[in-house]
Image (cartoon, rainbow, N blue to C red):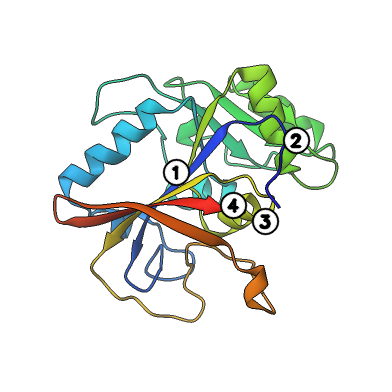
Amino acid sequence: MINRITRPHVLIMSEMTVDGKLTLWKGASSKILMQFMDPETEVLLHKTRAEYDAIMVGSNTIRIDNSMLTVRLAEGKNPIRVIPNRGADIPLDSNVLGPDAQTVIAVSEGAPPERVAALRKKGADVLVAGKKDIDYPLLMTLLYEQYNVRTLMVEGGPTLNYYMFKNGLVDELRLIHLPFIVGGADTPSLVGGMHINSVDEMFHLSLKNHYMCGKNLVTEYDILY
């Protein structure tokens, strides 16, 4: 069932290969594949960032890609950067801890105080959202109430995408299709963590738009709960 908490409208936007892979192999940066995105599609990605109040990626993406999560190829403001990081242990030289935009690090109650202090010293807001793990519905409520986030864009990896879907927190999905097949049983795909036992457990989508953006096919879906 969809989570009816007070929360932002959430869009997951991702590039992926024809066989649904996000990278070339487990542990590889997604930037390797993103270099094959059409320039028009790159602009679309940055325009979308500029349209949203906040952007969220997982801490593993920060460790691997060291993303900036800013608007650089389009007009508009930088969104608030949100990083769920229960142990407050993302590298202190991460680009998201730079001065380009406001950054919120969501941690658990068990995060070591010295790590929390180090993140705050770097200028990040540290938000406690959960006891042992990140409570994603709670995080959405806190972003809505404390940071006035009404729209949230997620550029997550398979783990973050899974938790967002699992908790009924996704409203829309926008996919940039790259014309490659990667393969690999353990190569990260769009959504991880799922081990369903019946078709009743699948997440259902409704295709609402599809178009070419430069040389890339883009598909857009509403999520049906």
Where's residue 224, x and y in %?
56, 54
Where's residue 180, x and y in %?
26, 71
The Cα–Cα distance between marks 2 and 4, rounded to whole angstroms, is 15 Å
The Cα–Cα distance between marks 4 and 3, rounded to whole angstroms, is 10 Å
Q: Is residue 66 left or right of residue 167?
A: left
N-terminal of the two: label 4 or label 3? Answer: 4
Secondary structure at numbered mark 4: helix
Tell me which corner region of the image, top left, top right, bottom left or bottom right, holds residue 165. Answer: bottom right
The Cα–Cα distance between marks 4 and 1, rounded to whole angstroms, is 16 Å
Nearer to us: label 4 or label 1 = 4
* CB under 8 Å between discs 4 and 3: no
The Cα–Cα distance between marks 3 and 2, rounded to whole angstroms, is 14 Å
In front here: 194 or 207? Answer: 207
Tell me the amino acid under the disc marked 2: Leu
Residue visible at 45% across and 34% down in the picture: 95
N-terminal of the two: label 1 or label 2? Answer: 1
* CB under 8 Å between discs 3 and 2: no
* CB under 8 Å between discs 1 and 3: no
Tell me the amino acid under the disc marked 1: Asn
Question: In the current view of this chain or complex, which residue is farthest to the left?
Answer: 214
N-terminal of the two: label 3 or label 2? Answer: 2
Secondary structure at numbered mark 1: loop
Q: Is residue 8 left or right of residue 52?
A: right
Residue 138's disc is: 2
Tell me the amino acid under the disc marked 4: Leu
- Residue that mark 1 sits on: 66
Q: Quadrant of the C terminus?
A: bottom right
- Residue that mark 4 sits on: 160
Residue 166's disc is: 3
Residue visible at 62% across and 49% down in the picture: 164
Tell me the amino acid under the disc marked 3: Lys
